[in-house]
């Protein structure tokens, strides 16, 4: 694959990621929760920051932009619907647009729900998706600004990506997400296997991401709301997938 990635922690439990095109030397930061860890990652890799690709406007994804832009003069790409809430934006994008990082190319997928303008960057040639706070490992983001209908539609877009797409999300929430998911599907073998794997990863000081679309389809209850067994598990047999999703999300909010 042409794209190299470097994953690192920011703030308390945010993830930062660098995406690097070895042919041209271009490097993008996916979001910028804070500047110092991004600078440390650049130093560790020897890469030069050329771009920041923003998924949504929340401060824990944008607070590092100003410092990084001042130091590196990098291009800031942001969702068109949230550009006014994000500092120092150079280029706005929406559904159907593409973004180049050197010779790497990402398709923009609008994935509203957590925020109204949230987007995902899908580097189709490298089977990499940077989903921000829409899809987590065994979870999804809170429906903070949108509606359950919006979020379910966004999750379906991501679920339809190729199964071996590697998904990078914005936070390390996997163990907590697994504990909740097991209240919905306690007998899900794929979820049990993921629980054991995640426990080993955390014990070893390793990240639990990236995950893959296939792994999430097998174990993430938020992607499984249209399955009769999941509907039955939350007492909503025969109800729509959106209703089932909304119930699962409401339960997670209280968990």
Image (cartoon, rainbow, N blue to C red):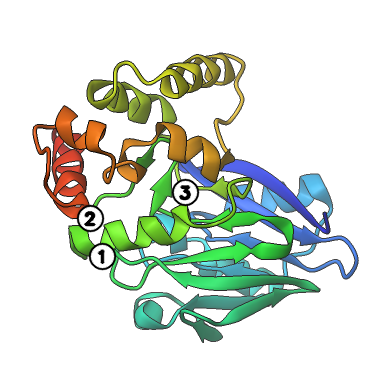
| Most foreground residue, 55 or 154 | 154
- Where residue 223 appears, x then y in whole percent? 36, 45
What secondary structure is marked by label 3?
A: loop
- Position of 130 relative to 12 (above/below): below
Q: Which residue is mark 1?
A: 150
3D distance between C-alphas at marks 3 and 1: 19 Å
Q: Is residue 12 visible?
A: no
3D distance between C-alphas at marks 3 and 2: 15 Å
Q: Which mark is residue 143?
A: 2
Location of the N terminus (image quadrant)? bottom right
| Mark 2 Cα shell of 10 Å, populated few (<14), some (14-19), many (≥20) | many
Q: Residue at x 47, y 48 (%)?
A: 170
Q: Are marks 2 and 1 in contact (CB under 8 Å)?
A: yes
Q: Is residue 94 left or right of residue 155?
A: right
Q: Quadrant of residue 104?
A: bottom right
Query: Which badge, 3 or 2, comes first in the chain's sequence?
Result: 2
Q: Is residue 120 left or right of residue 1?
A: left
Q: Which mark is residue 96?
A: none
Q: Residue at x 28, y 40 (%)?
A: 227
| Most foreground residue, 12 or 161 | 161
- Where residue 57 appears, x then y in whole percent? 37, 68
- Position of 54 relative to 237 (above/below): below
Q: Which residue is mark 3?
A: 170
- Where residue 50 appears, x then y in whole percent? 72, 71
What secondary structure is marked by label 2?
A: loop
Q: Residue at x 50, y 67 (%)?
A: 54
């Amino acid at each position: 694959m042409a794209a190299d990635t470097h994953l690192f922690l920011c703030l308390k439990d945010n993830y930062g990621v660098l995406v690097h095109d070895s042919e041209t030397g271009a490097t993008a930061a996916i979001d910028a929760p804070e500047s110092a860890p991004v600078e440390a990652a650049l130093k560790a890799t020897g890469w030069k920051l050329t771009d920041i690709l923003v998924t949504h406007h929340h401060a824990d994804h944008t607070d590092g932009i100003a410092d990084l832009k001042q130091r590196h003069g990098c291009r800031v790409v942001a969702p068109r619907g949230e550009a006014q809430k994000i500092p120092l934006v150079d280029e706005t994008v929406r559904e159907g647009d593409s973004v180049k990082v050197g010779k790497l190319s990402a398709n923009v997928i609008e994935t509203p729900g957590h925020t109204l303008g949230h987007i995902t960057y899908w580097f189709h040639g490298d089977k990499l998706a940077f989903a921000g706070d829409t899809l987590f490992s065994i979870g999804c983001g809170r429906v903070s600004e949108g509606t359950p209908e919006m979020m379910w539609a966004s999750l379906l877009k991501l679920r339809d990506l190729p199964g071996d797409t590697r998904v990078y999300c914005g936070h390390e929430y996997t163990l907590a997400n697994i504990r909740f998911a097991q209240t919905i599907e306690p007998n899900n073998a794929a979820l049990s296997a993921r629980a054991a794997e995640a426990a080993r990863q955390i014990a070893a000081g390793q990240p639990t991401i990236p995950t893959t679309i296939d792994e999430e389809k097998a174990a993430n209850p938020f992607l499984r709301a249209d399955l009769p067994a999941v509907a039955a598990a939350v007492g909503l047999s025969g109800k729509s997938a959106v209703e089932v999703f909304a119930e699962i999300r409401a339960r997670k909010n209280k968990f």
